[in-house]
Image: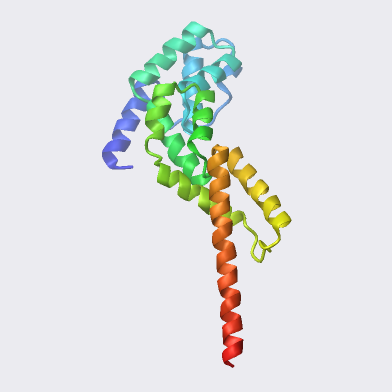
Amino acid sequence: MTASSKRRSSSAFAKAGGDRTAGPGPEPDEDRDADPASVARAIVLRQLTASPKSRLQLERKLAERNVPEDVAAAVLDRFEEVRLVDDAEFADMWVRSRSQSRRLAKGALRRELADKGIDADTAASALEQLSDEDEEAAARHLVERKLRPGTDLSDRAERDKITRRLASMLARKGYQPSQAFRIVAEVLDAAAGGAQSGGDSVEATADWE
C-alpha cells in the first residue's frame, strides 16, 4: 500500500469513528449502557480490522450482537460513504484470493459471493477478471497435482476409478461435469502417453546396448 493510500485509509477510518491507537479492550457489546451507534461502530471496526467483509456479513454480525436494525443500517451506510465497506471491492478481492488459493471455478465463486450478499451484477463484474483460460489452467493444475505418480493407467477399471475421483474433486470446486471429465481425460491421456514414451526409451536403450 502506498503512503497516499495509507493516508486515505486512515482518514476514512477516522471519519467512520475508528481509533487505530486503541488497544483490543473488552468486547463492545459488554457495555450495556453504551450508545447503540457507538457499539455498532466498534463492532464493525473490529470486524474490518480482522479481514475484509461484505455489508451482509457485517449486518449479520451486528444482528448477533442485538444491534437494532435501524442503527445497524445507519452505521453501515456511513461506512459505505467513506468506502470502508465496499461490496464491489470485496467481491474483486474475494475472486482473486479464492481462485488463486483454492483454484475455485466461477460457479463455486458465484455461490460463495451470493452467500455473502453480493448481488448478481457485482459478482459478474468481479468474475470477469477470471478468464476461461485461467479457469482451465487451474483445473489442469489440480488434476496433475492430485494424480499419484506411478499410477497404472493401462488398467481400464483403475483408470475409470481415478477419472471419477478427479472429476468429483473438480465438481466440488465448481467446475461443470462435462468440463471436469474432459480435462481429467486429457490429463490422463497425457500422463499415459508420457509413461509409454518413457518405457519405449528404456527399451530402445536396452536394445542399443
Q: x and y percent of residue 69 in the render?
A: 51, 8
In front of the other: 131 or 37: 131
Q: Which residue is farthest bottom?
A: 209
Residue at coordinates 60% horizontally, 81% vertically from top-left?
202
**Image quadrant where one finds the C terminus:** bottom right
Between residue 16 and residue 154, name the one nearer to us.
154
Q: Identify the residue shown where x is 43% and y is 16%.
A: 76
Q: Camera-side residue: 96 or 161?
A: 161
Callout count: 0
Residue at 46% over, 35% down: 94
Residue 31 in view of the camera? no
Rendered position, 156 above or below 58: below
Question: Is 138 located above or below residue 92 in the figure?
Answer: below
Q: Nearer the viewer, residue 206 or 128?
A: 206
Q: Is residue 204 left or right of residue 151?
A: left
Question: Which quarter of the figure has residue 9?
Answer: top left
Instruction: Quadrant for residue 172, please give it.
Output: top right
Quarter of image, res 206: bottom right
Residue 178 position in % (x across, y down): 55, 40
Q: Is residue 122 left or right of residue 162?
A: left
Residue drawn at x 39%, y 23% is: 121
For the N terminus, the quadrant is top left
Q: How is the image coloured?
A: rainbow
Residue 144 percent across, percent down from the top left? 56, 56
Can you name the residue that lies furthest to the right here? 157
Any part of residue 123 in sight? yes
> Residue 119: x percent and y percent?
44, 21
- Above or below 80: residue 146: below
